[in-house]
Image (spheres, helix red, strand yellow):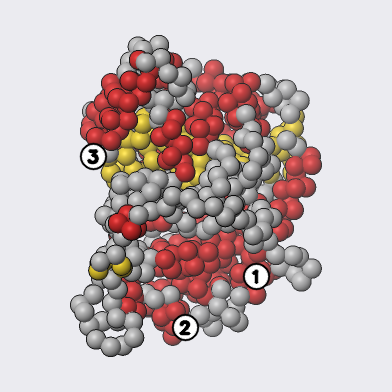
């Protein structure tokens, strides 16, 4: 049985905010199944007594001094924006009203 | 002085005023004009900016100012590092035309040192790949054989070095993207200790693994560049606040007598090309001749490193790449005044990301989703602990570890591009280093008998002991140069139009 179904891949694409064509989904579902089959072997050695490592350095809550430093001007910050309005990022509607 | 010289030789010639930085920069642009139509190492050339930088260095030198050793030496920058005002695409359509409003810390340091940034180099999209075939702007070709891959993800940087388009380059290494390209092009590349070089302005792929590092044609040149870009940076919360190991002195020492060098049992055998293993073993024999002691070490959990990597890196990538949402920068598709932000986001990411990036985002989204998290991402994190433990145990018995860098020499463009798992196997020997956050170097150790293509020798050193890999690498390089009678790149066929 496949480790992952085409419907599950479609749901993941929805969660990841990527539109996918039927062809893309068909192709990716097959590939995901093969890849998951290969990477699942991490479970062979991941016993309960092994602590997880999320990061090579054991650093926590690194903060800098709370002093004001120069930062981007509004013009610089908006320089790469697809659309702007005055000194703001202009985005498509988010609340369902045209 | 020629463009085939090493950066350290160029540095001396500049210092003695035998050549100006402007002349040297122009010579490199001439070479790029002659060969890059065939190699395609560069995505963008900043000739105007580079020549202005070079003129400024010449002016300072004429005024007798004290300059950094690399002042006036040209460099190729991987297109994953931001440079203010210069297009930064990460090899992706989603960032086409984006000009970052700030410099990465690496670029700030390069500019301060007077290093001349020629342009931005090609790469697998968002550094995901081992062949540079995943670039949205077309593949880079290996100067040794234009039908073959230059490695990846930093294939543009490695090819630029091997084609004498630049004597220095910057790469980034998440699972081998500096070292494997170096291996297959006969050049040198170093992944410093995680936290050794700032990640500020390095567009993130997998933040707990990504590390920028120096690339060049010799160990000493790599060390000179390492020295310029390394060091603590308050803008990177994972930057290590310690002094940089003296990698330049280490690469000049040429003495490995009594050093204990561990050969990793698991990084050999099945899947490794015979010519690769032969050249690796010959290099180990050279180290014995130089007085080093060889110890065989076993790292049993390395067998699971590849599987763990292809869960951890996609998981972190699925989170990091969420920032490409078409709202604040980059591509925006389908904004017709009617569609919602979410619809526009979905369409933009469909059009802007390539196949491999989508594959990894979906894989990572799956590995992090509730119900699967413990079985996949959680288990991979435990494997990471086991790999670190294997390294810790090995380093109690030896000073450095060694292995082939990549299991094969450069393969043909297109040969593995439809088989993700076959492609992922290229990183089998380089991934453990990233998982543990330690240092790794690749330097050339000969040409494989089967195909006459370069083989990479990997040296791994404990965290913040980066000088050790330079020490061993420098000594091995000198011994091999003596044996070959000329640098390895002199065995490569000459490119059409090349100097």
Chain of the residue under label 2: A
User: Which residue is under mark 3?
Assistant: B37
Q: Foreground: B222 or B376?
A: B222
Same chain assignment for discs 3 and 2: no
Q: x, y (%) of residue B238?
A: 59, 52
Q: Assess disc 3: are there few (<14), some (14-19) or many (≥20) residues with their C-alpha within 10 Å of its C-alpha.
A: few
Say whether disc 3 or disc 1 marks the residue closer to the N-terminus.
Answer: 3
Which is in the foreground here, disc 3 or disc 1? 1
Residue A8's disc number: 2
- Where disc 3 sits, the SS reads helix
User: Dividing the picture into quarters, in which one does residue A87 lie?
Assistant: bottom left
Q: x, y (%) of residue B444?
A: 51, 32
Q: Foreground: B163 or B413?
A: B163
Q: Residue at x 34, y 43 (%)?
A: B120
Same chain assignment for discs 2 and 1: no
User: Dividing the picture into quarters, in which one does residue B387 lie?
Assistant: bottom right
Query: Is the Cβ of the residue at disc 3 closer than 8 Å to that at disc 2?
Result: no
Q: Foreground: B52 or B403?
A: B52
Query: Is the Cβ of the residue at disc 2 closer than 8 Å to that at disc 1?
Result: no
State whether residue B461 appears in this view. Answer: no
- Where disc 2 sits, the SS reads helix
Q: How far apart, in angstroms, are the residues tagged by discs 3 and 1?
A: 46 Å
Q: Is residue B164 above or below residue B184?
A: above
User: Dividing the picture into quarters, in which one does residue B476 lie?
Assistant: top right
User: Which residue is under mark 1?
Assistant: B378
């Amino acid at each position: 049985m496949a480790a992952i179904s085409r419907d599950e891949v479609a749901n993941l694409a929805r969660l990841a905010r990527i539109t996918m064509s039927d062809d893309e989904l068909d192709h990716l579902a097959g590939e995901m199944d093969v890849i998951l089959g290969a990477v699942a072997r991490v479970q062979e050695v991941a016993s309960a007594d092994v602590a997880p490592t999320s990061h090579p350095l054991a650093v926590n809550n690194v903060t800098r001094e709370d002093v004001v430093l120069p930062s981007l001007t509004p013009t610089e910050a908006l320089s790469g924006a697809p659309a702007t309005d005055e000194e703001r990022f202009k985005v498509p509607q988010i609340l369902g009203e045209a | 002085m020629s463009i085939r010289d090493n950066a350290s030789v160029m540095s001396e010639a500049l210092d003695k005023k035998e050549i100006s930085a402007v002349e040297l920069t122009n010579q490199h642009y001439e070479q790029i004009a002659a060969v890059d139509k065939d190699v395609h190492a560069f995505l963008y050339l900043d000739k105007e900016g580079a020549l202005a930088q070079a003129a400024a260095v010449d002016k300072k030198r004429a005024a007798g100012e004290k300059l950094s050793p690399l002042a006036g030496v040209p460099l190729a920058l991987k297109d994953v590092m931001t440079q203010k005002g210069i297009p930064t695409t990460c090899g992706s359509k989603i960032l086409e035309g984006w000009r970052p409003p700030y410099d990465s810390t690496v670029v700030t340091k390069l500019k301060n040192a007077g290093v001349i940034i020629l342009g931005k180099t090609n790469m697998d999209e968002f550094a995901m790949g081992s062949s540079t075939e995943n670039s949205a702007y077309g593949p880079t070709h290996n100067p040794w054989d234009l039908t073959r891959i230059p490695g990846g993800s930093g294939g543009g940087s490695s090819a630029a070095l091997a084609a004498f388009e630049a004597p220095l380059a910057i790469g980034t290494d998440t699972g081998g993207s500096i070292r494997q390209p170096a291996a297959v092009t006969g050049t040198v590349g170093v992944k410093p200790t995680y936290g050794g070089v700032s990640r500020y302005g390095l567009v993130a792929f997998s933040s707990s693994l990504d590390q920028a590092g120096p690339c060049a044609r010799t160990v000493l040149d790599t060390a000179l560049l390492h020295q310029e870009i390394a060091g603590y940076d308050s803008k990177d919360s994972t930057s290590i606040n310690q002094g940089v190991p003296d990698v330049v002195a280490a690469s000049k020492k040429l003495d490995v007598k009594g050093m204990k060098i561990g050969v990793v049992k698991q990084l050999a055998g099945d899947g490794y090309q015979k010519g690769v293993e032969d050249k690796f073993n010959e290099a180990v024999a050279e180290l014995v001749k130089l007085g080093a002691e060889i110890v065989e070490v076993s790292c049993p959990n390395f067998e699971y490193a590849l599987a763990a990597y292809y869960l951890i890196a996609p998981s972190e990538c699925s989170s990091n790449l969420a920032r490409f949402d078409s709202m604040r920068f980059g591509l925006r598709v389908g904004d017709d005044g009617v569609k919602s932000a979410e619809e526009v986001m979905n369409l933009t990411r469909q059009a802007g990301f390539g196949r491999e990036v989508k594959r990894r985002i979906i894989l990572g989204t799956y590995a992090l989703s509730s119900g699967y998290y413990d079985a996949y991402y959680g288990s991979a994190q435990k494997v990471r602990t086991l790999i670190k433990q294997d390294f810790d145990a090995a380093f109690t018995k030896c000073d450095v570890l060694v292995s082939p860098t990549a299991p094969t020499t450069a393969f043909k463009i297109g040969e593995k591009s439809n088989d993700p798992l076959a492609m992922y196997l290229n990183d089998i020997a380089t991934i453990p280093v990233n998982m543990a956050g330690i240092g790794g170097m690749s330097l050339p150790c000969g040409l494989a008998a089967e195909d006459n293509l370069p083989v990479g020798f990997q040296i791994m050193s404990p965290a913040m002991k980066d000088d050790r890999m330079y020490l061993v690498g420098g000594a091995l390089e000198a011994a091999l140069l003596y044996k070959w009678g000329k640098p390895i790149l002199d065995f490569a066929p000459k490119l059409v139009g090349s100097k």
